[in-house]
Image: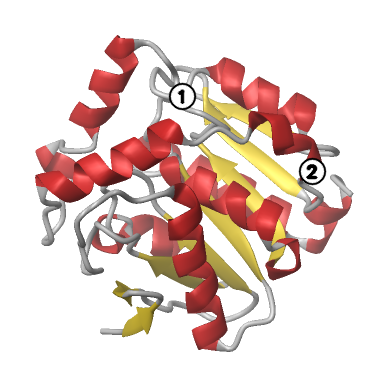
Amino acid sequence: MPLTLVNDIELYYESHGSGDPLLLIGGLGLAVSEMQPLIEALAAGHRVIPVDNRGAGRSAKPPGPYAIEQMAGDVQALVAHLGLSRAHVLGISMGGRIAMTLALERPGLVDRLVLVSTGPRTARRRSRVRLGMAISRLPGLRGEDPQPRHALTAQFRASSRFDCTGRLGEITRPTLIVHGRADRIAPSALAREMHARIPGSRCVFLDGGHLIALMPQHRDRVVTTVREFLSPAGSAAVT
């Protein structure tokens, strides 16, 4: 399986399907091995390149601290390694913050931006913080590469410190926001705020909570929505 040296770590990634490249960036503790049904569905029309963020899956898990900007740099280095000039970028939860950072710092790399179950900052309520940590360690979602506590903590702190709210208006790439109506980790107000601040963005609310992209009962609707947006007609609707 592909491991490549980027920056100071070995980063794990896969490549599925053919067509325009679509980078898939997971959330807190989420590994490529845990996204296989989503990857397979998206690969029906694109070359899907899922990546294990530093600290998760089969990528290296160095001591913290980590930063969202650092993880975005890892993805940027992977894109260079693969010889891609640009790609669609889909980020889930914490991965959405990484995707936003790429769109802000390296807009030429990003073709179209898809933000799923995310926000420009974390919710501040302590109950939501605890719930997010608990969800990240649910046994039913864990793959073959469990995340050590130090890496989970480093990722969580990186995500919690991040806030690009004031820069959302600088995102120039066509953007789709997909959010669960019942999301308790990233409240729907964050999705509405992104939609209001990102010029020309499209926002779609679907039934379900924070894990809509991973749960079988909601995944097909997420995939259909993303495919429509990534089609030529879908992109034209938001530019």
Quick one: 47 or 228, which is closer to the camera? 47
Crowd band around label 1 with a 10 angstrom C-alpha radius: few (<14), some (14–19), many (20+) = many
For the point 89% across and 49% down, the residue is 239
To which quarter of the image does residue 189 belong? top right
What's the residue at 40%, 38% (across, down)? 159
Q: Position of residue 42 (x, y in %)?
A: 50, 62
Tell me the residue at 61%/57% (across/down).
102
Q: Residue at x 20, y 50 (%)?
A: 151
N-terminal-most mark, 2 or 1: 2
> Which residue has dot 2 on it?
170
Give amino acid for label 2.
Glu
Residue situated in front as seen by the camera: 18 or 88: 88
Is 225 displayed left or right of 169 in the figure?
left
Q: Residues within 10 Å of mark 2 (few under 14, many from 20)?
A: some
Relative height, residue 129 to residue 60 (above, below)? above
Query: In what quadrant of the picture does the N terminus appear?
Result: bottom left
Count the marks.
Answer: 2
To which quarter of the image does residue 232 belong? Answer: bottom right
Instruction: Give the image location of residue 142, x and y in percent.
Output: 15, 48
For residue 143, say whether it is visible.
yes
Mark 1: amino acid? Ala
Q: Do the numbered discs 2 and 1 sit on residues whose CB atoms are within 8 Å? A: no
Q: CA distance from mark 2 to mark 1?
A: 22 Å
- The picture places residue 133, in percent across and down from the top left corner, at 23, 30
Q: Which residue is mark 1?
A: 186
Q: Secondary structure at mark 1?
A: loop
Left or right of 69? Residue 135 is left
Mark carried by residue 198? none
